[in-house]
Amino acid sequence: MTATTITSRGSGSSASVFPDGFVWGAATAAYQIEGAAAEDGRGPSIWDTFSKVPGNVADGHTGDVACDHYHRYAEDVRLMAGLGLAAYRFSVAWPRILPTGAGRVNAAGLDFYDRLVDELLGHGITPYPTLYHWDLPQALEDAGGWAARDTAHRFADFAAVVHDRLGDRVGTWTTLNEPWVAAFLGYCSGVHAPGRRDPAAAFRAAHHLLLGHGLAAWALRAAGAAEVALTLNLAPVIQSGDGHEEAARVDALMNRQFLDPALRGRYPEEVLEIAARHGGLGHIRDGDLAVIHQPIDLLGINYYNPSFVSAAPGEPANPAFPGTEGIRFDPPTGPTTAMDWPIEPSGLETLLVRLSRDYPEVGLLVTENGAAFDDHLVDDADRDADGDFDGDVVKGTVHDDDRIGYLDGHLRAAHAAISAGADLRGYLVWSLLDNFEWAYGYHKRFGIVYIDFETQRRVPKDSALWYRDVIERNGLRSA
């Protein structure tokens, strides 16, 4: 892919035009937006259970209602169409399809995604389903969860069921979203569902998630899927001071623990050594890595910020990174988002260029990039959102210049990466809607569309209208 930079005559500034066919879209996840947690036969997930334990989620918030997307999906698709989105990445709720994780298929759950896919296609939007975005059926967790090998096989069965219903209209399938988070925040630090604090279980879960990816990829290919993808949360690891051993160790745990098995068919030696000290390697069986190393067409990249580390003798391991004794994870020193995450657009360029250099056989897609800020609805006047939202009159506005600046900076970094040779094929903003932000509940707003959670009113923020203009011109204005 070749990006184009057009220099404005006499100004020295430049406009960044993305390659023809570059995919523009937005992303969400089922538990964060759907609601309808106990409707139409849906079974409980680990997040239903986890969020109802006092202290696990801010202010006791749950995803029981969320954005009520289950009932309001048609309205949300109209919003997407008004923004000019070409692609919509959503996740399929496993407990909505298989309420106990296996066995009886819930037809009503499949019917919902049937309707959603048809609505998207009817508005010219390509569906990009993700099969696992952290909502494991509780019944499977009760049987051991991702720490149990059988869950990987049940996941492949689930993938086959969903493809059987939607495969005639869906071309690109993503197996997993961010297996590092599911394994190490869910089974090691315990700040995500299922809330376990067992490093050995976390390494087993990571392996079984990858095994599930490989088995599901094989099942999807066998059923005729055109493209298969895997989405990882990836970040450059930057070490302050002399040396690089600490950064290399964190990079192995955060990035290469998943990249190398999926794309190279092997684990980094650093990861095997650390895992061996935390429960052994008996969960890795002969032939597993061959299964995990299925060819994929796209690598989805969720990028938010780099990690900064330094040597700190005597420092205990980070709760989410077993094996990081003697390493300090340094706090940000510059601008941050409402999540206290550093704003470092250059990290995206660095990451994309590295991935295309080290793993040139796979195309790249930014599947999540965005920021939470303290957004406020100014509810003082009606405004017609330029006539592009089916004539809907939207009351109020949200001026989110910080988010516009964040997205502009990261898109310029993405453009620079393409110019440097990265095979980046699209960008999906996180997120379409303000939503249930996991352990933060409804306190952190990532959406380009504001949700009034009391009334479920949708209000496109200034960033949504800015993004619509970026999509329309397939690029960014002069800096």
Image (cartoon, rainbow, N blue to C red):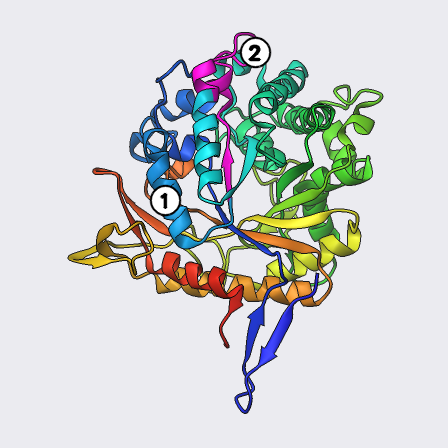
Viewer-proximal residue among 316 and 363: 363
Left of 61 or right of it: where is 232? right
**Can you name the residue that lies furthest to the right here?**
286
Q: Residue at x 58, y 68 (%)?
A: 17
Mark whose residue sits in front, 2 or 1: 1
Q: Residue at x 73, y 43 (%)?
A: 256
Question: Residue 36, how many percent across, how many down?
Answer: 34, 24
Indicate whether residue 348 is drawn in magenta. Answer: no
**Can you name the residue that lies furthest to the top here?**
104
Neighbour tally class for label 1: few under 14, some 14-19, many 20 plus, Cα within 10 Å: some
- Identify the secondary structure beneath mark 1: helix
Left of 111 or right of it: where is 186? right
To which residue does mark 2 refer? 102
Q: Is residue 121 visible?
A: yes
Amino acid type at image mark 1: Arg
Q: Which residues are magenta?
A: 88-110
Amino acid type at image mark 2: Ala
Left of 243 or right of it: where is 64? left
Question: Residue 447, how many percent across, how many down?
Answer: 39, 48
Viewer-proximal residue among 232 and 87: 87
Left of 56 or right of it: where is 308? right
Q: How many discs appear?
A: 2
Indicate whether residue 103 is drawn in magenta. Answer: yes
- Identify the secondary structure beneath mark 2: loop
Q: Residue at x 32, y 29 (%)?
A: 71
**Can you name the residue that lies furthest to the bottom here?**
10
Q: Is residue 401 above or below residue 296?
A: below
Viewer-proximal residue among 478 and 241: 478
To which residue does mark 1 refer? 78
